[in-house]
Amino acid sequence: MDKTYTFHASAHLLGRTKAYVAAEAVPLALQFSTPPEFNGERGKWTPEHLLVAATSSCLAATFRTMAEHSKFEFISLHVEAEGVLEKLEDGLRFTRIVLRPRLAVIHEDDRDRAVKLLQKAERSCLVSRSLQTEVTLEPLIVVQAADEISLPVPAY
């Protein structure tokens, strides 16, 4: 049985400086700008950030679903993502996105299974599969006691 899903989002420009994106059934809109490198406002989400964030959040959500279905227990997952934008003959485009998931597991024996699940999640992530750019996975699996739960703070 074929299924089709539709998602709605919108971008709004208010004059020369205000802009925001909104999504159906999501109460919080995000302000955005072009990147500062292209004369945009510093401190705002950019379409480029949103694309890279969509890729990292898709990997995390897909992994969570696969872990639940596989009865795989983990402590935490933190996905760093780096999008590389280059000027090519036909203009600017992302040439690659590198995903660096840091997965904390409880048991040493879970390392191999964790890597396999992360790789499967990356192959199954609908955002990565929808992009024309190369998406690379560079996982780091750490063994951590359950009572040592901590989430890394991004250094941005």
Image (cartoon, grey):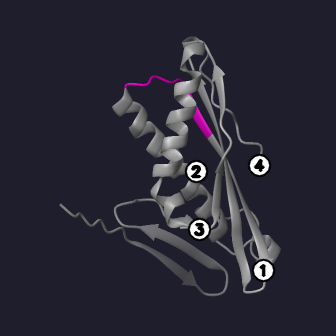
Q: CA distance from mark 1 to mark 2?
A: 24 Å
Element under disc 3 = strand
**Disc 3 residue type (three-letter):** Gln
* Residue 76 painted magenta: yes
**Highlighted range, magenta:** 71-78
Sequence order check, earlier mark of 3 and 1: 3
Question: For mark 1, what is the residue?
Answer: 88
Kindly report which numbered mark, 3 or 1, lies closer to the viewer in this rendering.
1
Kindly report the secondary structure that dominates the magenta region of the rendered protein. loop
Give the foreground label among 2 and 4. Answer: 2
Q: Which badge, 1 or 4, comes first in the chain's sequence?
A: 1
Q: What's the CA distance linking mark 1 and mark 4?
A: 27 Å
Alpha carbon separation for disc pair 3 and 4: 18 Å
The amino acid on which the numbered mark 1 sits, given as a three-letter code, is Leu
- The amino acid pointed to by label 2 is Ser
Label located before the other in sequence (2 or 4):
2
**For discs 3 and 2, the disc positioned in front in the rendered view:** 2
Residue that numbered label 4 is attached to: 156
Determine if residue 46 is in view.
no
| Residue found at x 48% / y 52% | 125
Q: CA distance from mark 2 to mark 4?
A: 16 Å
Image location (x, y in percent) of residue 16:
66, 86
Q: Residue at label 3?
A: 31
On the image, numbered disc 2 is attached to which residue?
Answer: 56
Q: Residues within 10 Å of mark 1 (few under 14, many from 20)?
A: few
Relative vertical location of residue 73 with respect to residue 12 in this rendering, above or below: above
Identify the image quadrant of residue 143. Answer: top right
